[in-house]
Image (tube, rainbow, N blue to C red):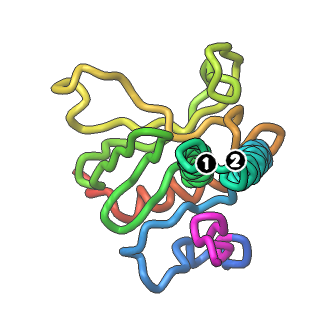
Amino acid sequence: MPLPFLTADHAFDDVADDAALPFDDRDQWRRPYRPGPWRVGASALLLLLASFVLFAAVIIAFTGSLAGAAVCAGLAVLVIVASLRLLRMGTWVSAHGLRRVGFLTTQTVAWAQVSAVRTAQQPVRWLGLPRTVQGQALILVRRDQGAQGGGPQALLTDRNADFLTRHEAFNRAADSIEVWADEYRPTA
């Protein structure tokens, strides 16, 4: 079964400098980077756990307790859904705007609402944990920032599960998202 959200668009790797957005269908949401090894490894461990839980459900079903087997199978389905959602997390772009997919929430910002997308040195969370370290972050500044009362939002960091120990990949991803912003953000 193909999982299109696992494969990033590799057209950024082989594109010439004069064609920064090498896609024919720019209306399709895409993540301009590959998922990192930490994210893929955590998802693989969750899928391994789900296989053990499904095996337990089969054993429980053979012993005659169908209610217990159904509970185990339901738990396995929840773990599989969590694993797939973990793989889908990240920043996605299209001609419509910028989308930040979290584990439980998804936020979409139209390009007309984007004031700036820039890279900044700042304290960032290490692997999404409460501990912060000094690092780089791709920052989204919205035009309606004052009305919502929030500050700039970090889209990517070089210390998250996609880019930990992959600084060149972070720079390529940040540059490509900035190019999308420059291409579609209205200048005013």
Q: Is residue 88 magenta?
A: no
Is residue 118 or residue 52 the one in the foreground?
52
Compared to residue 57, the image places residue 124 above or below, namely above
Q: Is residue 2 magenta?
A: yes
Label 2 CA crowd tier, 10 Å (few <14, some 14–19, many 20+): some
**Where is the N terminus found, in terms of image quarters?**
bottom right
Residue located 21% across and 26% down the image = 148
| Whether label 1 touches label 2, CB < 8 Å | yes
Tally of numbered tags:
2
Q: Secondary structure at mark 2?
A: helix
Question: Is residue 101 found left or right of 124 in the rendered image?
Answer: left
Question: Is residue 127 found left or right of 118 in the rendered image?
Answer: right
Looking at the rendered structure, the kind of residue marked 2 is Ile
Is residue 60 or residue 175 the one in the foreground?
60
Which residue is identified by label 1? Answer: 69
Res 174 visible: no
Question: Is residue 179 found left or right of 131 in the rendered image?
Answer: left
Which numbered tag is attached to residue 60? 2
Q: Which residues are magenta?
A: 1-12
Label 1 CA crowd tier, 10 Å (few <14, some 14–19, many 20+): many
* Residue 82 sits in quarter: top right
Is residue 43 or residue 112 the one in the foreground?
43
Residue located 44% across and 44% down the image = 117
Looking at the rendered structure, the kind of residue marked 1 is Ala
Q: Earlier in the sequence, mark 1 or mark 2?
A: 2
